[in-house]
Image (cartoon, coloured by chain):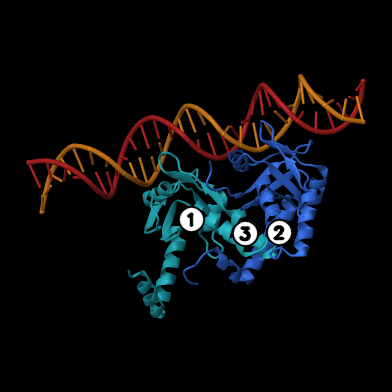
Chain colours: A blue, B cyan, C orange, D red
Amino acid sequence: MRKSFLFLDTIINKVDAKGRVSLPSDYRAIVKDLSTEIVCYRSLTSPCIEGCTEELLEKLATDIENSTDFFSEDQDDLTNLIFGDAKRFSFDSTGRIVLTEKLLAHAEIKDNAVFVGKGRKFQIWSEENWAKEEARIREKVKQSRPSLKLKENDNDK
Amino acid sequence: MRKSFLFLDTIINKVDAKGRVSLPSDYRAIVKDLSTEIVCYRSLTSPCIEGCTEELLEKLATDIENSTDFFSEDQDDLTNLIFGDAKRFSFDSTGRIVLTEKLLAHAEIKDNAVFVGKGRKFQIWSEENWAKEEARIREKVKQSRPSLKLKENDNDK
DNA sequence: TGGTATAACATGGTATTTCGTGGGAATCAA
DNA sequence: TTGATTCCCACGAAATACCATGTTATACCA
């Protein structure tokens, strides 16, 4: 029983000729502890693969059912896209999953896959695209510190 | 189990060739009492490593989930930056963690690591950078004493 | 108060395990 | 049968758990 489950860190693993990739061991631990599965789909906004626990997708489905005003119609459409695109992935005894051609192509992944933790979700990038993306975000944060207020009550500065 | 905790004090420990450092025993006590883990990431604003309990990051993840919608761009960028950089650290039977090259490089730490308590978080500095930073802060406080008084009143009980 | 015994801690070194990865066998589908 | 997919074994590198020692801080007693 695990009290917290966060996808963290940035980990680079190899993709072999068969499309196999080791899911980072930390991520596997989460899946095992929660007795759930990993679900992946093409990111709607970036050239990367997005993944989360099946549990989270269920929660998303429930939220949509219950709160019609919170989720706009647009977002409802988006969720349809996701559920339609999402696929369940289970790993073998050595901890590997086999990504599909569709996903790999969307993320432009060739040899190496970069797993990026996002808390409740994670993403899988090609090295090149992730380098660009990380640079973009860090630059953006430099410009607008305010968005970081969420992080917690910083003393001053 | 304790309901409140504070990372306090300034402690210097050695970093060996493998990147191992003793986590200050006070900090370890907090981790044990809360049954949580330590999470570290590169400071967004300073050349230092920042650390907190995984529990705190958990709370952050929940806050983000609730405050913005599932597909928000800001949420997307923020979570990538924070959770993608954060790494879980558990200490061995002698109380040491192994810092990564990425973190050590960012903080410019070579031989010695300076742990600085910040309440809910703490920071790890190189001796040189911390000396500069401390001088800067003390100088700043001299200029604007009033703001400090406010803080002390807050702490009164 | 002072001195000694005891425990806690930081740190160096070593052994063990885990994890990622390549290759091949087995299974399945067409 | 042939090609593709899944399962299993094996190896090397890297992470981490364990053991040992010196030093410092703490507790205890005279």
Circles 2 and 1 on the same chain: no
State the image coordinates of residue C15 (x, y, percent, origin top left).
47, 27
Question: In this picture, is D6 found above or below A31?
Answer: above
Q: Earlier in the sequence, mark 1 or mark 3?
A: 1
Question: In this picture, is B152 found above or below D5?
Answer: below
Q: Amino acid at mark 1?
A: Cys
State the image coordinates of residue A28 (x, y, percent, origin top left).
62, 40
Give the Cα distance between marks 2 and 1. Answer: 26 Å
Rendered image: mark on residue B52: 1
Instruction: Judge from the rendering whether residue B37 lies leftward or rightward of residue A58; answer left or right.
Output: left
Helix, strand or loop status at disc 1: strand
Q: Amino acid at mark 3?
A: Glu
State the image coordinates of residue A141 (x, y, percent, origin top left).
63, 67
Q: From this viewpoint, is residue B52 visible?
A: yes
Residue picked out by circle 2 = A133
Residue picked out by circle 3 = B65
Disc 3 is attached to a residue of which chain? B
Helix, strand or loop status at disc 3: helix
